[in-house]
Amino acid sequence: MKESILIKIMRYFFSIRGVLDEHNLREVNKVATNAFMFLWIYTAVANGALLIVSDKFLTHSTLIWFLFVNLIIALGGVSLYVTRKISKLKLNYREVSVEEYPKAVHQAIIHGAWFGIIYGIFCYFMMARIQGLFSLFTILFTLFIVVMGWTSDTQKEIGHIVKVE
Amino acid sequence: MRRNEATSIKLMRYFFNIRGLLDEHTRNAINEAVVHAFIFLWLYIFIATEAMVTFSNSANLTSMMNIFVYANLFIGVGGTNIFIRQTVSKLHLDIQEVSESDYSHAVSDAVKSSMISGLLWGLIFLTVLMTSNVMKTQLIILSALGFFLLVWIIDSWTAISHIVKVK
């Protein structure tokens, strides 16, 4: 079955490795519906509230806090919810034959590399605000995060590859 | 059937005007649209928040924040709302089929739920105007009242026009 690009993106970000048959697809849809409704209402309420809050409360630190709460609740919370549900459905396991195993490991390493790079870019811009764009600390810290993200994701991905006879 | 529906489905029915019966085909079509909307909204919030964290500084934060909030409401909330409502409309799920005897009851329900919607929007409009200090208080109250009536009338009209009598 041909999957749309958005389902592929969902597979990538929420580590969906298993086959999406009719039952699994229904369950994933249910999870996505819950996550969407939460995210949609949260976005409407949080931004609406910010719009009606008086200007005197909108200090620099309040706005920075708002952004971080946004990142933690809207992105972190939703990702955690979806990933946990996917894990309960055991869709984060990939079953491969013995011959396909090395190829799957190679793909896991590539996946880990992308994860590390995206995570690294994210951290680079966060650190660049504090330390400066070309600071040695920012660059070294970013490299550290890339390597950390790469290795931890690769390890997790390989741990979820199951050899079947 | 509707009583056993999950809370998220009930919320979807309310916010996206899903009035029809959700059988397997329509449920799958709606689910597909929701998955697309979810991924879009999730990625959008991720990119927009990351851009704000990166490019805002204390000098331009307030103006950037205004753009960010309005963009979130229009693109994130409004965009996905239009997309799902269009899917609902294409599937004719926004049409409520009632018998001739139930018609008056359905119209009365539509007027009541539109009034709640109007009250909510009127309150939001009132709060926005009160905090922005752009007009005199009497004018603000009158404008909010006008907005409430406008939303009530438009919403009732839309809801009633989607009620279909069946034999």
Image (cartoon, helix red, strand yellow):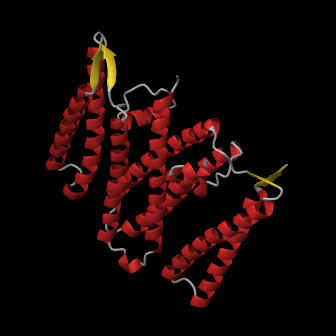
Residue at position x 61%, y 90% in the image: B138
Residue B86 visible here: yes
Residue B33 coordinates in the image, percent (x, y)? 57, 41
Residue A6 coordinates in the image, percent (x, y)? 48, 36
Residue at position x 28%, y 50% in the image: A125
Tell whether B100 sits left or right of B126: right
| Front residue of A35 and B6 | B6
Tell whether A105 sits left or right of A10: left
Q: Pick the quarter of the image with the C terminus of chain A.
A: top left
Question: With respect to residue B7, does A102 lie above or below?
Answer: above
Residue B167 coordinates in the image, percent (x, y)? 85, 49
Question: With respect to residue B74, does A136 lie above or below?
Answer: above
| Front residue of A65 and A42 | A42
Residue A6 visible here: no
Question: With respect to residue A7, does A36 lie above or below?
Answer: below
Residue at position x 21%, y 58% in the image: A130
Counting labels gives 0
Residue at position x 27%, y 31% in the image: A112
Residue A55 coordinates in the image, percent (x, y)? 41, 78
